[in-house]
Amino acid sequence: MKPDLFSAPDYYQIDDLLTEEHLLVRGATRDWVKREISPIIENYAQEARFPEHLLPGLAEVGAFGPYIPEEYGGAGLDYISYGLLMQEIERGDSGIRSTASVQSSLVMFPIWKYGSEAQKQKYLPQLATGKMMGCFGLTEPDHGSNPSGMTTNFSDQGDHFLLNGAKLWISNAPFADIAVVWAKDENKRIHGLIVERGMEGFSTPETHNKWSLRASATGELIFDNVKVPKENLLPGRSGLGAPLSCLDSARYGIAWGAIGVAMDCYDTALRYAKERVQFDKPIGQTQLQQKKLAEMITEITKAQLLAWRLGTLKNEGKATSAQISMAKRNNVAMAAAIAREARQMLGGMGITGEYSIMRHMMNLESVITYEGTHDIHLLITGLDITGLNAFK
């Protein structure tokens, strides 16, 4: 494995907009990624294995629930810090960032926002340290972009709930200790339930043969008459808006994470263009390659500003779901386009594991789909600006 020589671009001096705490968080995470992820990630991706040994390190850099208050084991950081954490981790690998995103935004967030005090005390401190890992069950085999159509359901059995159904494409499922599961009650109202590994009838078969997110653990959640204690119901909110608010948090992190991928592909291509000689000169001296690099840094800079402004709005409690959708859609599409161009710049070398670009390209095919597809986010923006619902 080549040494990680990554040097982050900052064409518009965006670091001047960051606080000292932001820079410290980013610096510590960047150093950890270079030390712990970069040397091993290509092998794990090639072997389609999740590097579970990284979980304690992710906890140590604050990647699990960084914005969760300290009283519940979180770091109490702001949303720009959270974004920078996701940016640096995804620069290492989208699958590892997915693990952190799920733990933070899809497991800890709903427990923090909608859980009882007893649930917060029981789960959040252990989730923050990585001693307990979680997953999020919303997507079903027949209901992806239309989660309201879910068929997973539970019924009141007096002293417990009885849960039945299945969830698909669930990151962290194969090793998760708990699952925050969204299901309909007898009145077709959606609620969140905390399902614990070991409950009879609950299984998590792993999904194999993936070409994308190969270093991430993906699986199913199967519920066959699972008895869930009533105290495991999230009491703070019901309805589809509850899981969608969790997705907003995850999408926000993705908007930052995609910048990390784009930065890594750009930095790799820039370094290669200066070193690779053809026709007696570096390929970076040719007009076409300079055009590609100039367009890359332009799009990265625009995405950085978009994410920073969104983070500022999040800190002020002003960011809307539609604004988050725009950032997720734009930044992931930007990263995918840069990865593709960077791969071409490296020629045949671009498809090998000696460089990170092809792995990033494959990973982004999942990132552009999950937490709301590219097209669904387009329609969310369309609904927001016209007031006309294209989903119905």
Image (spheres, helix red, strand yellow):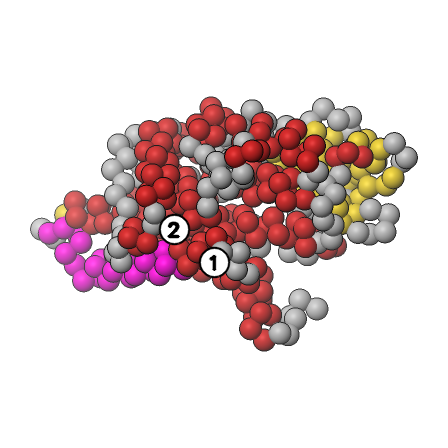
1 vs 2, front mark: 1
Where is mark 1, residue-wise? 313
Where is mark 2, residue-wise? 259
Hey, which quadrant is residue 116 in on the image? top right
Q: Position of residue 278 (x, y in %)?
A: 15, 50
Residue at image position (66%, 49%) is 243
Binning the other alpha carbons within 10 Å of mark 2 as few (below 14), some (14 to 19) or many (20 upward) gives many
In this rendering, is residue 384 above or below 158?
A: below
In this rendering, is residue 136 above or below 295?
A: above
- The mark total stands at 2
Q: Position of residue 222 (x, y in %)?
A: 73, 35
Q: Position of residue 114 (x, y in %)?
A: 67, 44
Main SS, magenta residues: helix
SS for tag 2?
Answer: helix
Residue lying farthest to the right in this orientation: 158
Start-end of magenta stretch: 281-306
SS for tag 1?
Answer: helix
Instruction: Evaluate if marks 1 and 2 touch, with contact meaning CB atoms under 8 Å apart.
Output: no
In the figure, is residue 296 to the left or right of 198? left
Q: Position of residue 214 (x, y in %)?
A: 49, 37
User: Is residue 177 located in the magenta-colored stretch of the structure?
Assistant: no
User: Is residue 282 located in the magenta-colored stretch of the structure?
Assistant: yes
Residue at image position (56%, 43%) is 105
